[in-house]
Image (spheres, grey):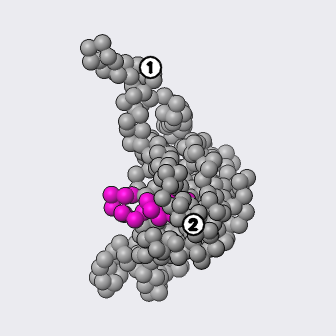
Amino acid sequence: MTLRFPLRFRSIVRRTALGTLLGCILPLSVGATDSEVVAKIGDEVIHLSEAEATVQAELAELDSRRHAILEAAIDRLVSDRLLEIDAEARGLPLDSILAEIEAEAEATPVTDAEVDRWYQQNQARIRAPKAQVSDQIRTYLENENRARARAAKVAQLQEKYGAEVLLEPMRFDLHLEDAPSYGPSDAAVTLVEYGDFECPPCGRLHGELKKLKAEYGDRVRFVFEHFPLESIHPNARAASRAAFCAGEQGEFWGMHDALFENQRSLNEATYLAHAAELGLDRDAFAGCLASDEANAAVDRDLADGRGVGVGGTPSLFVNGRRVHLAGDPYQSLKAELEKELGR
C-alpha cells in the first residue's frame, strides 16, 4: 500500500524543502543579495553582508531552530496520518490504536530504581530533595515510555505503508580539518562536540560519549571543538590550551579525558601533572601552554562554533545536523546516531 497524504501536507513538504534550500544560500530578506545596500551615511554605504557578519551566530541559530520546528511538525503530521490509516485499514476506531500504544507503554512500568537512577544522573541541575520531586520524575519517565511506544508503532507503520519524509535535514558545513578526532576519517557518521572543560553538563556527557565510543567502534568518528565560556568558566580556556598542547604530542584524548574527569582541579599544576602521567615532554608542553599558537587554535574553534550558531555547551552536531538532547542523554544521542546510520 502506498501512503498518500492530504494535499495540505504535501504542499507543506514542498514549500519547506524549497524554503530550507533558499535559507541556506540566500539572506533572510526576500530578494536580498550580499551586495545590497541597506544603509547610508553620507557617501558611505553599508551592505547586507556586513550586517549579517555581525550576527552570524544568531542567524544560524534561527535557521536551525526554524528547521527543527518544521521537522517536528512534519513528524507529527506523518505520525498522526499513519495511525489514522492503520485504524481505517483494520476497521478500528483511532482510539483503539491509541489504547494499544498505551497498553504497550504500561507493560513496562517505571520502577523505583529507575526513578532513583534518573534523580542521581540529574541531581546537579534539579537541586531539590528526591522526595520532593520523585512523583514528577515518575510522571516524566512514564511519558517517555509512551513516547517510545508511539515511536516504535509509527516506525512499524512507516515500513508497512511506505511512508517517506522528503524534507532533508539542515546540515552545517563544519570546519574540522585540524580538529582532534577519534575514529576513522571515513566513518559513516561524524559526531562533533563543541565543549568546555569546566562545563558541568559537558562533564556529565563525557561518560556517555565514552560508552558510545566503545559501542560504535569504527562506525562513528568523534570530534572535539573547543568552546570555552570564559565569562562563567575562568579556567576553561587554559584547559583547552592544555588539551591542544597535549595534542601536539599525540595525546589530545588522554588529556581530554583527564580534564573532564578532574573538572574541579583545573589549574596549571594539574595540567603539568596530567602531562607527566601521559609521558609528555614537560618543557615542550609548558612552552606550548604559554604560546600564541595554543590561543589561536582555541580562537579558531570559537569562531567556527559561533558561525554555526553555537552559544552554549555542550553543542552537538551529527553529520553536520544540530541535535538537542532530551531525557536520557545516552539514549537520546544513540537514537540520533542510529538515525544517521540508517540513512
Expressed as whole percent of the image width and height from the top left, the position of residue 131 reads 31, 86
Name the residue nearer the viewer: 107 or 43: 43
How far, Cα to Cα, is label 2 from label 1? Answer: 51 Å
Label 2 sits on residue: 283
* Residue 77 to residue 17: above or below: below
> Around disc 2, counting alpha carbons within 10 Å, would you say few (fewer than 14), some (14 to 19), or many (20 or more)?
few
235 falls in the magenta region: yes
The magenta stretch is: 229-244
Q: Please indicate whether residue 159 sits to the left or right of residue 58 in the image.
A: right
**Observer-nearest of 310 and 104:** 310
Q: Residue at x 44, y 41 (%)?
A: 60
Looking at the image, the residue that sits furthest to the top is 43
Residue 92: % across, % down: 55, 60
Q: Is residue 230 above or below residue 271?
A: above
Q: How many C-alpha atoms fall within 10 Å of the one at disc 1: few (<14), some, or many (≥20)?
A: few
Q: Is residue 327 above or below residue 173?
A: below
Which residue is more in the foreground, 40 or 265?
265
- Which circle's residue, 2 or 1, is located before the other in the chain? 1
Q: Which residue is mark 1?
A: 35
State whether residue 92 appears in this view: no
